Amino acid sequence: QSVLTQPPSVSEAPRQRVTISCSGSSSNIGNNAVNWYQQLPGKAPKLLIYYDDLLPSGVSDRFSGSKSGTSASLAISGLQSEDEADYYCATWDDSLNAWVFGGGTYLTVL
Amino acid sequence: QVQLQESGPGLVKPSQTLSLTCTVSGGSISSDAHYWSWIRQHPGKGLEWIGYIHFTGTTYYNPSLKSRVTISLDTPMHQFSLKLNSVTAADTAVYYCARRGGTYSFDYWGQGTLVTVSS
């Protein structure tokens, strides 16, 4: 059971928009910055979002992040088949004194 | 462009010590802003942070693994290493090395290496 809760899967049609949620608590999301990672099948994770809503250089602006209280969200617009992947949220947990990850959400582009 | 590459045995016997090395290229391992990390992923599962080390030698470990983990740094060789002792089948996973950058995110990752614990 992950400290951060994500839906196991989401699906949406090409060119549409999807959001992935990440729920935590005051000791993690509520007090620390959230990152999002994309993991394509068989590949290493790749940083998509840092500091809740900032995009690293080279990441498409179809990806966006937001946070409110103890929850965070990743939105992907203009869905493409190559967006099919696992997506993970992550942050530091002040109570556990550890980095924690969500369980991951697999995105299917129908 | 920073690159990280894991190396080490792909098969470890139960009760023995898992040892992996990560070689860093394209950037300094001695930057004050960076922490050199190990993260693992059990087959078909999510990501688990193991720990990281700063170039000063300061280490931070996941409390759930702390009693079995040692992360060390070899600055001249641009490498850092993971040792996990008393392994069991539950330690079978893909092990990634990664850099925790100044943006408090894991911004560069190695390709990962599968370590299987089996007799």
Image (cartoon, rainbow, N blue to C red):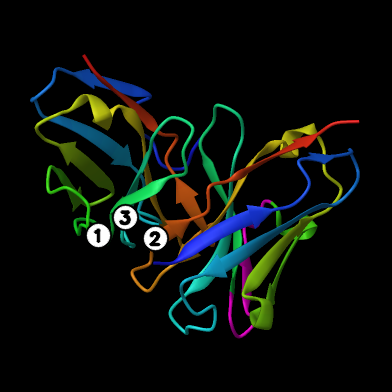
Local SS, label 3:
loop
- In space, the residues marked 3 and 1 are separated at their CA atoms by 13 Å
Residue A56: mark in rendering: 1
Q: Is residue B115 above or below residue A25?
A: above
Would residue B90 be found to the left or right of residue A4 on screen?
Answer: right
Q: Name the N-terminal-most of marks 3 and 1.
A: 3
Local SS, label 1:
loop
Residue B90's spot in the image, x, y percent? 74, 34
Label 3: chain? A
Quarter of the image for residue A82 reads top left
Q: Start and end of the magenta stretch?
A: B54-64
Name the front one of labels 3 and 2: 2
Name which residue lies at 53% across and 60% down: B4
Q: Amino acid at mark 3?
A: Val
- Badge 2 density bin: few <14, some 14–19, many ≥20, Cα 10 Å: many
Residue A26's spot in the image, x, y percent? 35, 55
Query: Which residue is at the front of the view, B116 or A3?
Result: B116
Q: Amino acid at mark 1?
A: Pro
- In space, the residues marked 1 and 2 are separated at their CA atoms by 9 Å
Local SS, label 2:
strand
Q: Which residue is mark 3?
A: A34
Name which residue lies at 46% across and 38% down: A43
Q: Amino acid at mark 2?
A: Asp
Which residue of the protein is positioned furthest toward the top in this rendering?
A110
Q: Which residue is mark 2?
A: B107
Determine the main secondary structure of the stretch shown in magenta. loop
For the residues labelled 1 and 2, say whether their Cβ atoms are less than 8 Å apart.
yes
- In space, the residues marked 3 and 2 are separated at their CA atoms by 13 Å
Same subunit, labels 1 and 2: the answer reads no
Residue A24's spot in the image, x, y percent? 36, 45
